[in-house]
Structures are given as C-alpha cells and as structure tokens.
Amino acid sequence: MTSTAFTLEFGRFKLDLGPRACIMGILNTTPDSFSDGGKYTSLDKALTRAREMVAAGAHILDIGGESSRPFSEPVSEQEELDRTIPVIEAIASRIEIPISIDTVKAKVAKEALAAGGAIINDISAFEKDPAMVDVAVETGALAVLMHMKGTPKTMQVNPSYDDLMGEIITYLQERVHFVLKKGMAPQNIILDPGLGFGKTVAHNLVLIKELHQLTALGYPVLMGPSRKSFIQRVLGNVSGQKAGPWDAGTEYGTLAACAASLMNGAHIIRVHDVEAVCAFSHIIDAIRNA
C-alpha cells in the first residue's frame, strides 16, 4: 500500500513523508544500549558516526543519552544532558538534517532543541514528565508519541493485552487528545506503537501485520524494529540457534521487518544500519509507488 502523504516542518527543515521512506538513524551516546552501547560516547566518534549515516542516506538523526533497553536503569538529568547536548551542538553546526532527541525529560528536550534539535522522541508519550508538552508547544517542535506498557525496567515482565491493537490505538488517541488540548499543532505529531516496549514476540508480529489500523488515525507513523529481540527469537525458533545483535541473520531480519512495516503504511523507520536500510527502502518505495 502507498502511505498517506504528510509534510513535517520545523524551522529550516522540511520532511515529505509518504512517497518515500524516511530513515531515522540511531546514535546512542550511552554505555549500555542493547546494540551499540559504548561505541559513540566520545564526541569525535559520535560526530564521525553521524556523518557516516548522513552519507548513507539518513533523513533524521536520533540522539539518545539514556538506554531504554529492557530492564535498564534510568540515569540522572545531568548525566543525560552531559551525554547528549555537546553531541547535538556539534552535529547541528555541521550537518543539515533534523536531529531528534530521544528522552523522557523535559529539560533535556528543551536544551536539545536549543542546541539545534528539531524533534522530541518520547517513549512515554509525554506522560513521564508533565512539562514535556509545554516544551513542545513553546518551541513548536515535532514530537513522537510512543506506546509503552510499563517502564523499560518492567515492560518485558509478562506483558499481556485483551485487545492488542485496540489498546494501543486507544492509548495513542488519548495522548494525541491530551497534547492537542495543551496547544500542540496536529501537524507536529508522529505516532509510534512501540515495537519491543512491553510486547511479546507475537505482539510485535501482529503490530507490524495490522499497522494499517494505526495509520488510519491520520498521523505519520514511526516504526523501530532495528535489531530487536523479537527478530532474534523468530530466527532462533527457525534455526535452533540464538542470534546475536550484530550477526547477519538479525540484520536481514531487521530488513524484513522494515519492509513489512513500510508496506503496511509506516512513514519513518528508525534503524542502526542506515546504509542497508536506505538501499532496501528504495526498492520498497518503488514497489509501493508503482
């Protein structure tokens, strides 16, 4: 299916979504993220990686300073600021694509936007910090509202749903209503159903398969399947071996999940391996637009 077209704008940045996949490259400045923790904690390494992803075709860079992997512990506000703000300042002064700040803390988001960011990517959908919506409204920033059952520390402890798609859609509708009441512009909202955040393997697979139910709400949809454990577990069930986050099987599995997400209406794909996904998505775009 061809995705509904949207245009996102913030300052000098403009993103046309729908006809082509929008690729969000992941840049974690954390020591403990599940896939790339510790790799880009220095400013030079982070800037080098940012340039590599832009050269590979990334349309957005997503900077995170607090791991949200299952069972992870939160970090202090100051630690997160120290990890992310210098990186955002360095990238924003050298690279001309939108920067997203992956945070649940309003002060971190505010400082990130002041440093050159354009998007708030909040896994709590503005629930964790009540001041987050004020930052979004005051700055006019774009915002990703994500569904998560529980917290990163608890979300994978036997997650269950009576109606998976219905509950996720209802939750995101409620969060949209909340931010609109607070004064946020509807054209600044992006939705994310939260693959891997309080979901079993089966839940994640159904989410991708039934994604059209979420896109029907009329907002751009972001999907983040990259190197998630559900891909490793599916592959392990087939091969009998546990796949690691850096092996070829997991990367191929990520491509398959990206393809299915795009074919079912996703607009933005959040990934680690930008080069592979960009090449792959060009073919998916051609098929969707044929």
Image (cartoon, rainbow, N blue to C red):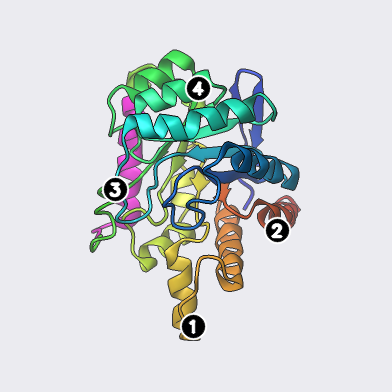
Nearer the observer: mark 2 or 4; the answer is: 4
- Give the side of residue 228 with respect to residue 5, left or right: left
Q: Secondary structure at mark 4?
A: helix
**Circle 1: residue type:** Val
Mark earlier in primary sequence (4, 3): 3
Q: Secondary structure at mark 2?
A: helix
Mark earlier in primary sequence (1, 4): 4
Disc 1 crowd, CA 10 A, few/some/many (<14, 14-19, 20+): few
Compared to residue 32, the image places residue 246 above or below, namely: below
Q: Secondary structure at mark 1?
A: helix
Q: CA distance from mark 2 to mark 4?
A: 31 Å
Residue 73 numbered tag:
3
Q: Visible in this render: residue 189?
A: no
Mark earlier in primary sequence (2, 4): 4
Nearer the observer: mark 4 or 3; the answer is: 3
Q: CA distance from mark 4 to mark 3?
A: 25 Å
Q: Give the labeled residue for mark 4.
A: 113
Q: Residue at x 43, y 21 (%)?
A: 110
Q: Residue at x 49, y 18 (%)?
A: 140
Bounds of the magenta segment: 160-178
